[in-house]
Structures are given as structure tokens and as C-alpha cells.
Amino acid sequence: MLALRAIARSAPRTVSRIAASTPKTAFIRPSLQTSLRSQIQQTSLLRAFSTSFVRRDDASQELAAKLQQEIALETEDSNAPAESNENIQRFLEQNSHWELHDLDNNQEVLLTRQYEDESITVSFSIADFNTPMMDGQGEEMDESLMDEDEAAMEQSQSGGANTKGAINQGKTSGGNFKVAPQDSLAPADREELKSPEEEYMDGAEEEQPAFPANVNVLVQRKGKGALRINLVADAGIFNIQSVTHLPDNKTTTSLTPSELIRHELPTLYTGPPFPQLDEEVQSLLEQYLEVRGVNTHLALFVPEYIDVKEQKEYLGWLRRVGGFVE
């Protein structure tokens, strides 16, 4: 659109300049007059080429128009009130010890804080929004759950009605007890028997975006190196994947926390898979992180922030690409 306006403005100026120069050329020698005419024609051709190229490129104009439509739609969605925005603001207000570092047109987000003599950095990326993890595993889990449900149904239909703890009991003609639908639920799954903590987690899981997020935690201590811990935030829970100690040396001290999190050290022993550790060691490592603020609230915050930031970055991407092709 800008190119079209530029053509409209430049076209009459070119004509007027040529017209104004015509009477003056009558007093110039024929050879010089011919040279001037060729220069004017070349200049006109160059201007026409440079300003009309975009005008003749229908594909660019169609793409720009489509991107403008997308921008209008995405802007409307972004302006709509979102519960995620409120949750993010609430987390930042209630956890002021975390400092947020978020740059436009950058997919990495950092949270930093000080804890005693430790510098703690939490890193996550909006790349996880477009590349959900464990898709295959999720399908396998869904199939296994369906198989278990079918097995439970078959058991309940083949004499499994005589179950202890049935709520609504009444004998059938065959001597079996009638079992109401709610009787097939385990006691821990019944709404009236749930604890407040379980109800809170159920609500958090309903609000939680349906994708896990990779999170890296870096705990640095001067003269002692750092611990690099890889986790997955999923449904309000942090699952530790690995714990690596990075020694204090020239390589590690010269890198920023963000670079240190991404830095590969091929010869460094990264430790065993977390599930292979002693159960008490696993539990104490989880407590170690929770004391430092890597807890349920943060595990809920990360996917929500990824969701909101991805939408903002997508809108910015549309504008930049649209501005380029216009």
C-alpha cells in the first residue's frame, strides 16, 4: 500500500519535470539535446521499474492483505480479557522475589532470584507451545486407560456388582446387589470425600493448558560451580529429568546463565536418570527445589505464560512479515 501511494505522488512530479525542461532544450545544441533526452528516458525507466515492481507483484499484495486480516483477528483475540493474564499478574505480585526477563521477538523467558548465597535462574521457551512433548506416549497412555476402563466395565457386568462399599444397594431378582453409577468410583475419586488440596489440584488441572513445558533451573554458587536441573512442568507438577553439576572453571564462569543452561559439555558426566536415584534422594531434591521457589505455583505459571507470550509474539511476527512484503 505504501508503494502505491509513492507511485501516485512521484508520477506527476516526473511529468512536470519533463514538461518544464522541454522549452529550454530548444536553445541547446542537437547533440546535447539528444543526450539529455536519453538521460531523462533512462531516469524515467529506472523510476518506473523501482516503484512499479511491487505494484505488479500481485502475490505480495495478496499476502500483505491476508496478513492484515490475520492481524485484525489476532488483535481482537489479544484484546479480549483472558484469565491467563490475571493468573500471571497474580503470580508476579505474590512472588516478587522472582524477576521476569522477557524480550520481544525472543522465544526464551527467564526468571531470576537470589536465595542466600545462590543465584537462581529459571529458563523456559515458547517453542514448547508449537512442539508438544510426549505425543506418542500420550496416545499410548490414552489407549492403556481405555483398556483399563473396558476391563473394569466387563468386571462390573460379570458379577462384579457384589462389591464392598457400595452406596446404593438393593437386591435384584438374581440375588445380586444393584450398584448405582457412583458406586463404581473409588472412594478417593468421590467428590464428597475429596480433601481441599485435591480439589485445588483438580481445579488447577482444568485450567492448565494441555501441554507440558521444558524448564531448566540453574543454581549458581560462587567458587562451587552450578547445578543445572532439567524439569518438565505438567499439570501443576514439576517432574525432574536430570541433575548435572557444572564445575567452576574458566568455561563456566565466562558464560551468562542463559548460555550456561544451553551450553553442551560432551565429556561431562551428567548424572544418572532421575528415576534411577534412591527414592529418598529424589524426594530431598524435590524439596531442595521447592524451598527455592520451584514449586506448584511456578509449574502452573510457566505454561500459562508460554500461552500468552506465544500469542503476543505471533502477532508481532505477523506485523513484521506484513511490513516486509508490503
Image (spheres, rainbow, N blue to C red):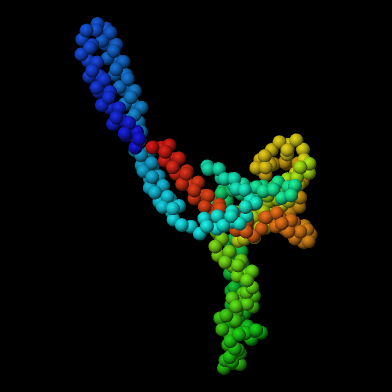
Measured as percent of width and height from the top left, residue 274 is found at 73, 55
- Give the residue displayed 73% in from the left and 54% down from the top: 273
Q: Is residue 132 in view from this perspective?
A: no
Of residues 235 and 253, the one drawn nearer to the viewer in this rendering: 253
Q: Quadrant of residue 44?
A: top left
- Give the residue displayed 71% in from the left and 36% down from the top: 254
Measured as percent of width and height from the top left, residue 106 is found at 55, 43
Q: Is residue 290 in view from this perspective?
A: yes
Q: Quadrant of residue 170?
A: bottom right
Please give left or right for residue 275 compared with residue 155 in the image: right
Q: Residue furthest top?
A: 29
Tally of numbered tags: 0
Measured as percent of width and height from the top left, residue 299 is found at 62, 57
Q: Quadrant of the N terminus?
A: top left
Whether 265 is drawn above or below 185: the answer is above
Measured as percent of width and height from the top left, residue 174 is found at 59, 92
Of residues 171 and 194, the one drawn nearer to the viewer in this rendering: 194
Please give left or right for residue 230 compared with residue 46 in the image: right
- Give the residue displayed 62% in from the left and 48% down from the top: 99
